[in-house]
Amino acid sequence: MSLWPNKYVIGLTGNIATGKSVVRKMLEHLGAYGIDADALSHRAMMKGGPGYKPVVSTFGKWILNPDGQIDRAKLGDLVFSNPEALASLEKIIHPYVGQAIDLLVKRANQKVIVIEAIKLLEGKIHNNCDAIWVAEACSKTQISRLIQRRKIGRKAARIRVSAQAPQDAKIQAADVVIRNDGTFEETWHQVVAAWEKTVSKKEAKPAPIKRTEIDTMTIHRAGPQEAENIAKFISHLSDGKRRMTPTDVMAAFGEKAFLLLKSGEVIAGILGWQVENLVARVDDVFIAAGVDLTKSIRAMMAEVESASRELQCEATLLFLPPRLAQNSDIWQQLGYTTRTVKNLNVRAWQEAAMESMPPGTVLYFKQLRKDRVLRPV
């Protein structure tokens, strides 16, 4: 019997840098609740996390940074070149990740769950999945992505790619294979087609376009079909400093969602945000001239916080341009305070800020829930 009898669970896997997270984000746009098991494993190893002391005891204090955090690059260099070390690390971390996944699935309101895990098939999680999806990409693409996104050398990238089992083994176990070497549009079409074919309508429907009225305007979550209008609006309001094409926006849909404030069919405001590792991050806020800033921000942030709480977020980080950040009274009324990365206190929140904070922006913070999924034991 499944651990989660009232859920339809998609297990999403694939080798390193095959674009699993993009596929997960696409499934989230279609209405699934996404869980990144690999991110949970990182959180389990953070200072104060349940796996921190066992990992340090096993591998030694040499893997620590000056601030006492585990240096994942050092640890990665060791375990990806030593199968026994990798097995030891997984033996420590996987039970904590399994506990966290179980808690998140049971809490989730969504009927469809997607669990992204690079070692999905090697562990026990896949036994409780209703379908296995695999993201596939050629080794050249994998190496290129590792170099560009993780800023590691070509030799290290090749070692990490070759350290994994051949992709064929995963593909043979798959119910759905997403070829992820091409454009965002090509991947999106594959994901939508597979969703419509394999996810029963009784179990899930595409995420509804929720419309909230504010005076004579409406707020709703955008779909990829609105990419062209989003690109034009952002390019216009940024005075050409941020020129965006529909292709750029389609690529952004692989990472984030957009809320649109509209007067009729005309866009009056855009807010872009993403939820990753139980932290919501708002990094795009554009409001047209003449629109009531207080009312529009209050209404749009209410939608973001509602969606973020439903996704079990612990905190919201706002990365605001100075012209919006100076309206501190608006943000304070909504419960946000200015912070630096250092005084966020929780390491997972600090990492979220360091990963996502655009240069020249001001950080505002709000805690959404006090209980945390991965607490020290």
Image (tube, rainbow, N blue to C red):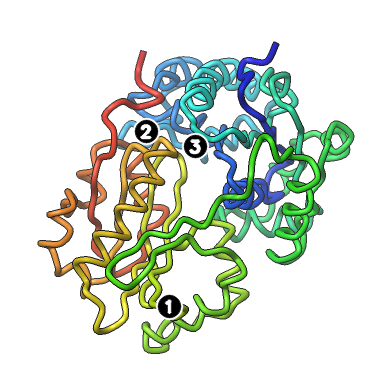
The span from disc 1 to disc 2 (Cα, nearest Å) is: 51 Å
Quarter assignment of residue 6? top right
Q: Nearer the viewer, residue 172 or 253?
A: 253
Give the quadrant of the C terminus. Answer: top left
The span from disc 3 to disc 1 (Cα, nearest Å) is: 49 Å
Above or below, comparing residue 157 to residue 266 in the picture? above
Local crowd at mark 2 within 10 Å, few (<14), some, or many (≥20)? Answer: some
Q: Amino acid at mark 1?
A: Gly
Q: Nearer the viewer, residue 55 or 304?
A: 304
Above or below, comparing residue 231 to residue 180 in the picture? below
Q: Nearer the viewer, residue 225 or 243?
A: 225
Residue 218 % position (x, y): 38, 67
Q: Nearer the viewer, mark 3 or mark 1?
A: 1
Name the residue carrying label 1. 264
Quarter assignment of residue 66? top left
Above or below, comparing residue 301 to residue 9 in the picture? below
Residue 47 % position (x, y): 35, 28
Residue 72 numbered tag: 3
What residue do we see at 73% from left, 40% from top? 14
Q: Is residue 145 left or right of residue 41?
A: right
Element marked by disc 1: loop
Element marked by disc 2: loop
Q: Amino acid at mark 3?
A: Arg
Disc count in the image? 3
Name the residue carrying label 2. 69
Q: Is residue 69 left or right of residue 110?
A: left
Residue 249 % position (x, y): 55, 71
Q: Amino acid at mark 2?
A: Gln
What residue do we see at 24% from left, 38% from top? 345
Q: Earlier in the sequence, mark 1 or mark 2?
A: 2
The reply to whether residue 134 is visible in this rendering is yes
Residue located farthest toward the left when viewing the structure as drawn: 329
